[in-house]
Image: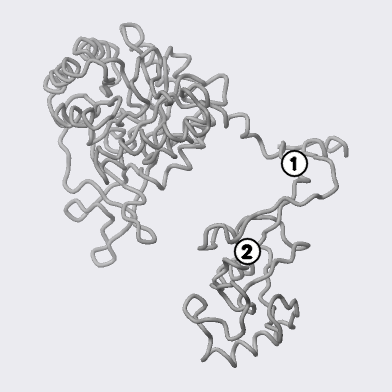
Amino acid sequence: MASLKTTFAGIECINPFWLASAPPTNCGEQVMRAFDAGWGGAVWKTIGEPITNVSSRYSSVDWAGQRMMGLNNIELISDRPIEINLAEIAEVKRRYPKHVVIASLMVESRRDVWHEMVKRAEDAGSDGLELNFGCPHGMSERGMGSAVGQVPEYAQMITEWVKEVARTPVLVKLTPNITDIRVVARAAKQGGADALSAINTINSITGIDLDTFTPRPNVDGKSSHGGYCGPAVKPIALNMVQSVMADPASVLPMSAIGGIGTWRDAAEFLLVGAGTVQVCTAVMHYGYRIVEDMIDGLSQWMDEKGFASLDDFRGLSLPRVTEWKHLNLNYKIVAQIDESLCIGCDLCHIACWDGAHQCIHTDRVTGPVDGHVEVHRKPMEAVHATMSSIAVTRIPKMDPPAVSHGHYKAPLARIPRVDETECVGCNLCSLVCPVEDCITMKEVPGGLAPETWEERTAKLGIVEQC
């Protein structure tokens, strides 16, 4: 069976699944329950001078029946005294010596303050330090969090201060609220960071109450921008992690964060080079035990693929991400509709005509015999026929066709057809189709040799202008 053990920036890990610095790692009792559930590590909720939090603190975006597709929070760092947090870290490490505990730190930007905080966290037994340069709300107003992470010079300077006294690996947590995340990643590396973690939350306002006009979450009639996380941010996080890991001037061991809630999410981040993954929102939604499925799922997938260890597939997807100008312009795919699976919902036709390239048609008519009858009506004839028959239109999934079409679920007239000469292979029809495998994309030979935009313009003697 595949092994999930790994070594991250010199830290031995029983598996790559860590809890992110957040409410699920607020105290020792929580972290110990998480370790009992199977988590390999935890990044302690950020420690600094205790602050006062507000009520309420969270809001969310629901979509298509899913609760908390995206979570927004305006909660700040730990509101518990530093000495209590450190005492609990020591107790957790005493009871769980093989599990990883990383101390997330955020203090004012003074060398002596950082030196003292680093020494106290390491004396408590933390296996490493995560410098919180990413938190976008509240603390940034006080010159900390993303206020540091958005200024490369500050990020490098404080990293250097920490490295002057640190005895354990130093991770720098990056903010996504910046034009190019690689700029600060490079600064952290130049400052001596041993590893990176990304991404922190994204600045957001999730919504506004249309009765009170107060944005959510409501704090006595007012609100504030907060940090957005959860499944909605995963594509953004995946792109940013990939961009850092593909940049030679930035690359360091990466602990990936951002919308990770399943083993599949974890595998994708490992494929773009992550060493470990950190999870927060999914645990806030479903609890610590989701790690059981993550461990089982990743292990089974690795077995199926023949990967004995995480290193066997870490970063394999990195070479497959490139600049647009390096893509093959002569690669051609077209949509194919499996008529036996089509339920005649018309979503692909609507999407293609209103949102894409008008290559899916609904002009088939049912002939006098069974099977395909590719008789195409003029568009207005189809419109008139639809209007005249709308009162008796069948529900394809519930009513059998008036004329038999073998094992097809929908009448032939309800099954769209693809004009392959017009199809540009955009994928939209396959994305909106509600039936799995009903619409697939098929490669078709174009008879042309592969050619990129860069190669084509070079042949034509065109000089690209920025």
Give me the residue at 36% from left, 47% from top.
204
Q: Pointer 2 and pointer 1: residues touching (CB < 8 Å)?
A: no
Q: Is 345 placed above or below 93 here?
A: below
Residue under label 2: 338
Q: Secondary structure at mark 1?
A: loop
Quadrant location of the C terminus? Answer: top right
> Of tags 2 and 1, which is closer to the observer?
2
Q: Secondary structure at mark 2?
A: loop
Residue under label 1: 328
Q: Quadrant of residue 318?
A: top right
Where residue 458 appears, as percent x and y from the top left, is 84, 35
As drawn, is 23 to the left or to the right of 68?
Answer: left
Q: Is 56 placed above or below 238 here?
A: below
Along the line of sight, the residue nearer the viewer: 416 or 285: 416
Give amino acid for label 2: Asp
Along the line of sight, the residue nearer the viewer: 338 or 218: 338
Where residue 92 appears, as percent x and y from the top left, is 17, 20
Where residue 227 appears, as percent x and y from the top left, is 33, 42
As drawn, is 79 to the left or to the right of 405?
Answer: left
Give me the residue at 58% from left, 61% from top.
438
Give me the residue at 27% from left, 54% from top.
216
As drawn, is 354 to the left or to the right of 120?
Answer: right
Q: Is 282 placed above or below 60 here?
A: above
